[in-house]
Amino acid sequence: MKLRIKDFLDYFKLVPDELHRLPKSDPRKMLMAGFLRYHFPVSASWIGQALSMGHYTTVSRAMRFFDKPDGEWRQDKKRILKFTG
């Protein structure tokens, strides 16, 4: 699976420079972080830094959100999994 963070940003129509302006617990960041953590051998610290999520514990919360996303985000998770193959 060859996927880049840019692919996620494109999916959510985000610009890399905007990531630091979004809240650390933004659902889009949480879904990206959960996916990256589950499917790639990268550390929570790396994800936290790459997505401007602050402390690595935010990535741990993101994994729980990825497991059981709320309401409309459940559909986005399904679409993400489909578009990533």
Image (cartoon, rainbow, N blue to C red):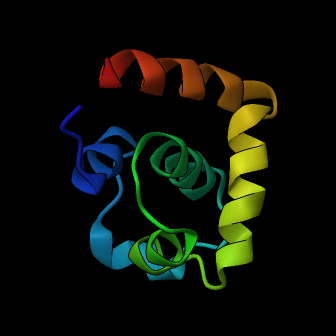
The residue depicted at 69 percent of the width and 55 percent of the height is: 62
Q: In the rendered image, which quarter is residue 71 located in? A: top right
In the image, farthest residue toward the front: 41
Q: In the rendered image, which quarter is residue 55 located in? A: bottom right
**Is residue 78 toward the left or the right of residue 46 in the image?**
right
Height in image: 6 above or below 66?
Answer: below
- Residue 49 appears in the figure: yes
In the image, farthest residue toward the left: 2
The residue depicted at 44 percent of the width and 27 percent of the height is: 80
**Is residue 23 toward the left or the right of residue 68 in the image?**
left
Work out which quarter of the rendered image holds the N terminus and state it. top left
- Residue 25 appears in the figure: no
Height in image: 37 above or below 71?
Answer: below
Residue 49 is situated, as x and y percent measured from the top left of the image, at 46, 81
Please name whichever residue, 10 or 65, is drawn nearer the observer in this view of the structure. Answer: 65
Residue 78 is situated, as x and y percent measured from the top left of the image, at 55, 18
Height in image: 16 above or below 71?
Answer: below
How many numbered dots are placed on residues in this image?
0
The residue depicted at 74 percent of the width and 34 percent of the height is: 67
Q: In the rendered image, which quarter is residue 81 located in? A: top left
Residue 22 is situated, as x and y percent measured from the top left of the image, at 56, 73
Work out which quarter of the rendered image holds the C terminus and state it. top left
Residue 46 is situated, as x and y percent measured from the top left of the image, at 44, 75
Please name whichever residue, 14 or 60, is drawn nearer the observer in this view of the structure. Answer: 60
